[in-house]
Image: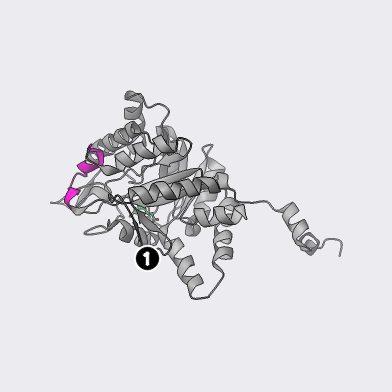
Amino acid sequence: MKIRPRRLRLNSSIRDLISESSVSSNDLIYPIFLTNEQEGREEISSMPGQFRHSRKSLIESIKEWEKLGLKGVCLFPKIEEKNKNSTGSFSYSPKNYYLDRIKELKDKFPNLLLMSDVALDPYSCDGHDGIVDHKSGKILNDETLEVLSKMSIAQAKAGVDIIGPSDMMDGRVERIRTDLNGEGFQETLIMSYSAKYASNYYGPFRDALDSAPKFGDKKTYQMDMRNSREALKEATLDSIEGADILMVKPGIAYLDIVSALKQNFHQPVSVYQVSGEYAMIKLGAKEGFFDETQMMLENLIAFKRAGADIILSYFSIDALRLLND
Ligand code: PBG
């Protein structure tokens, strides 16, 4: 035999030398959950090792995470039931603690990238990402854009670096970009959840924020898992509308989509390893079915190999600790 592929796998030095993919602290954004509390934190039962952070716990934790090399966080608020309504208007109210948190974090940690969530679900008494027409049960697209725009401007004013529309309404990137520019926020980035699928993998997240839909499902706005060409259409629209970064979500079951966006677009591509993916790895490892750290690495590397430039992952801190060792 002249060609023996195993020569290139002989030992770890040669394997490292020829390796094509790696994960670094430059790739990671850490999604975190916030509450209106001043002190303490509560563990999320369906996401062991992840917490809903109070103000103090968040500030103390970020100090540690920055030392590990964390570049950015994506913030998700848990909203009290009394502040939810059908239009999600609390999202842009000056009373919304989420906006105060953004302000304070930007002030205390000017180099940490802050990404927000733009969608109605945490603020909606219906648990949907858009306004519900209660007669027909339909999610109203164009009426929702109005709220998404106000929410985005409020977050930009508070000092967020990256606006993250996760709602999947048509035309939202265009509307948000235009209105941000109109208010003087030309430099605020938009990372669009371009190909966001209606997925079973979001279960633990909805538990963490108590934001599950009160009726029906999200299939009239989130994408159908059977389709990939539709992801190209969504990403095309988002690029034309002015998205700076295109996201695919969930991650591991949608690597073909990550790869397709990487090959077909010039924007950086991000991937969101969602709550259900995290929970599956955590629980499988706890049962002793595989090694947690190795399984985490295999998943993160898979995202990089598929073409992701950025990974949003609940494993970000564990990965940074590993990279620092
Ligand atoms: C809501 C939103 C969801 C996630 C991020 N933003 C849930 C949903 O669409 O129902 C899921 C994240 C995760 O599962 O980790 N707009």
- Indicate left or right for 141 with 180 as reference: left
In the displayed structure, 300 sits above or below 130; it is below
Q: Amino acid at mark 1?
A: Ser
* Nearer to me, 47 or 120: 47
Disc 1 secondary structure class: loop
Coordinates of residue 10 in the picture (x, y in percent): 79, 63
Residue ID at (35%, 23%): 184
Q: Nearer the viewer, residue 112 or 88?
A: 112
Q: Nearer the viewer, residue 320 or 152?
A: 320
Q: Which residue is mark 1?
A: 46
Residue 240 in the image, given as x and y percentages of width and height: 43, 33
The x and y percentages for residue 134 are 14, 51
Q: Residues within 10 Å of mark 1 (few under 14, many from 20)?
A: many
> What's the magenta region?
82-94
Query: In percent of the image, x 19 and y 44: which residue is there?
Result: 87
Residue located at (48% from left, 72% from top) = 286
Q: Quadrant of the C terminus?
A: bottom right
As displayed, is residue 178 above or below residue 142?
A: above
x, y percent for residue 3:
83, 61
Let me know if residue 97 appears in the view: yes
Q: Residue furthest left?
A: 135
* Magenta-span inclusion, residue 91: yes
